[in-house]
Image (cartoon, rainbow, N blue to C red):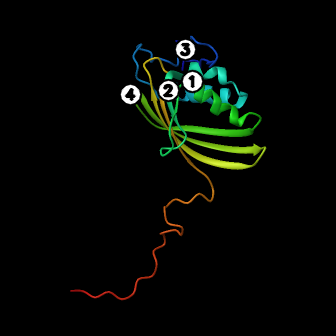
């Protein structure tokens, strides 16, 4: 976000009055900068193991799906419990918005854990923001090296060689 003079404004996710929650016109549509401010707050809270940031980032009844096929976590307490699982982990994270439309956003995220175990993830986060700028619906599509991309046990590509075909 820029101030009236065009200079960047530092945002602190711990500040409940931070203006990433509404656009300049006071409406509820999110822009790319506001989405990335939320993502940066999420990253800092996650890195710091700061479960107390959950109410500032998520609505009270937020839905948090760690996979589109898993049962979503519901509400602050469930999200806070989930965040404690990574306590003590060391990681780097990159993020960029892919799409922002109204109160919805898709963000491409890369996470590289270095400790206690090295692991790389490439994620897509599908986010829906409430009117106050907190996330009400979080859906993660995580991928990692070696994860199959099809239901088949062997890749379907390249296709197996086909025998001769006859035309009718």
Residue at numbered disc 4: 102
Q: Residue at x 55, y 40 (%)?
A: 66
In the displayed structure, 124 sits above or below 8; it is below
Between the C-alphas of marks 2 and 3, the distance is: 31 Å
Q: Which of the marked residues, 2 or 3, is nearer the chain's N terminus?
A: 3
Which residue is nearer to you in this view: 91 or 55? 55
Image quarter (top left, top right, bottom left or bottom right) of the N terminus: top right
Left or right: 133, with 89 as reference point: left
Numbered disc 3: secondary structure: loop
Image quarter (top left, top right, bottom left or bottom right) of the C terminus: bottom left
Between the C-alphas of marks 1 and 2, the distance is: 7 Å
Report the disc number at residue 62. 2
Q: Which of the marked residues, 3 or 1, is nearer the chain's N terminus?
A: 3
Q: Residues within 10 Å of mark 1 (few under 14, many from 20)?
A: many
Q: Residues within 10 Å of mark 3 (few under 14, many from 20)?
A: few
Residue 154 coordinates in the image, percent (x, y): 53, 69
Which residue is nearer to you in this view: 134 or 80? 80
Numbered disc 1: secondary structure: helix
In the displayed structure, 141 sits above or below 5; it is below
Residue at numbered disc 1: 76
Q: Residues within 10 Å of mark 2 (few under 14, many from 20)?
A: many
As drawn, which residue projects farthest toward the left?
168
Left or right: 102, with 98 as reference point: left
In the displayed structure, 93 sits above or below 153; it is above
Q: Which of the marked residues, 3 or 4, is nearer the chain's N terminus?
A: 3
Residue at numbered disc 3: 3
Q: Which of the marked residues, 2 or 4, is nearer the chain's N terminus?
A: 2
């Amino acid at each position: 976000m820029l101030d009236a003079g065009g200079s960047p404004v530092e945002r602190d996710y711990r500040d409940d009055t931070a203006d990433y929650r509404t656009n300049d016109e006071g409406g509820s549509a999110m822009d790319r900068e506001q989405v990335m401010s939320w993502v940066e707050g999420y990253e800092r809270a996650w890195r710091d193991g700061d479960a107390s940031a959950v109410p500032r980032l998520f609505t009270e009844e937020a839905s948090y799906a760690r996979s589109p096929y898993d049962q979503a976590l519901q509400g602050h307490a469930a999200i806070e419990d989930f965040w404690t699982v990574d306590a003590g982990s060391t990681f780097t994270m990159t993020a960029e918005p892919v799409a922002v439309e109204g109160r919805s956003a898709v963000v491409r995220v890369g996470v590289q854990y270095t400790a206690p175990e090295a692991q790389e993830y490439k994620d897509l986060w599908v986010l829906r923001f409430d009117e106050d700028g907190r996330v009400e619906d979080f859906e993660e599509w995580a991928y990692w090296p070696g994860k199959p991309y099809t239901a088949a046990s062997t890749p379907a590509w390249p296709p197996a060689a086909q025998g001769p075909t006859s035309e009718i």
